[in-house]
Image: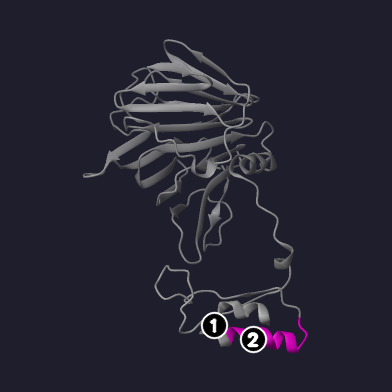
Amino acid sequence: MFSQDGNRLIFRYDAEKLWIEPWGDNALRIRATKLAKMPEADWALEEGRPEVNSSIDISESEATITNGHIKAVISRPGKIIIYNTATGKVLLEEYARNRNDLLDPKCSSLQIEAREFAPIPGTDNFKLSARFESQDPNEKIYGMGQYQMPFLNLKGLDLELAHRNSQASVPFAVSSLGFGLLWNNPGVGRATFGKHVMTFEAYSTTVLDYWVVVSKDGQPSDIVEAYSAATGYIPMMPEYGLGFWQCKLRYQNQEELLEVAREYKRRKLPLDVIVCDFFHWELQGDWSFDPTYWPDPGMYNQT
């Protein structure tokens, strides 16, 4: 049921395989699947796995993995609880209401699983739900990208995990309890930050994959810095892009765009970038220029 492979804690039960391993300072990556082999894609965590000192302890009733100020405990039936070792407080606890552990005070006949893999007929994929107990109804949650709404605190909200025009989904949440959670799954889904249960869903996937980081003192800056180290730093903007940008909806053809650029030059107005926004292609999704309306894109550098 429990085993160790280097600094990776492994749990197996029935068809499920689960890995918990350190992934940067004070951070753990948790993956689970019901496929024969754990998918290896790192997705947003492509910066790699930095070497850190961690410890694993396995007993008959539970297994524990500790990495700096974060500790994950997994019970024999497979329930995960994550702690801040500096404060001893529970930060995340999987929400399960079943009879897998009769000694669990939350044992219930509801048969709600913390990690639910619902098979999608005809495929190897699953509809995935990951559920966590809300530790504090007054918790504040920030982040998750850019949504068209007036709320800074996301507690109590339900968010679509998908990109749309005017919506950018970045599934990284920062909690006022002193942790950050990255839902490391590029699939379309939902995130619900209820006062009772926090749920992440992927409508079609092969693996549960999330990353949790803890700040010893609960500082959001520590959490965001660790997130940047794990996912990659934003590159410096090229100097040519630091000035004024001209863009409108939209330029119909090459001559229209060039005439606007020439007018800036005639008026001696500084212009660093002019954006040919969209529909310059022949076919939807093809980024080449339609030669009927854009016969010579190289003319851009003659303005």
Name the amino acid, label 1: Tyr
Instruction: Please state which of residues 206 and 279 is positioned toward the viewer in this rendering.
Output: 279
Residue 254: x and y in percent read 55, 83
Q: Is residue 67 above or below residue 272?
A: above
Badge 2 vs badge 1, beta-carbon distance below 8 Å: yes
Q: How many marks?
A: 2
Q: Which residues are magenta?
A: 256-269
Q: Main secondary structure of the magenta part?
A: helix
Q: Is residue 267 magenta?
A: yes
Say how the picture is coloured: one colour
Please report the residue visible at 78 percent of the width from the left and 85 percent of the height from the top.
Answer: 268
Query: For this view, does 214 lie left or right of residue 40?
Result: right
Alpha-carbon distance for marks 2 and 1?
10 Å
In what quadrant of the picture does the C terminus appear?
bottom right
In what quadrant of the picture does the N terminus appear?
top left
Residue 18 visible to an observer of this rendering: yes
Residue 81: x and y in percent read 49, 27
Residue where numbered disc 1 is placed = 251
Residue where numbered disc 2 is placed = 260
Query: For this view, does 272 lie left or right of residue 278?
Result: right
- Which secondary structure lies at badge 2? helix
Q: Earlier in the sequence, mark 2 or mark 1?
A: 1
The local crowd at label 2, few if under 14, some if 14 to 19, many if 20 or more residues have their Cα within 10 Å, is some
Residue 235: x and y in percent read 67, 53
Q: Is residue 29 magenta?
A: no
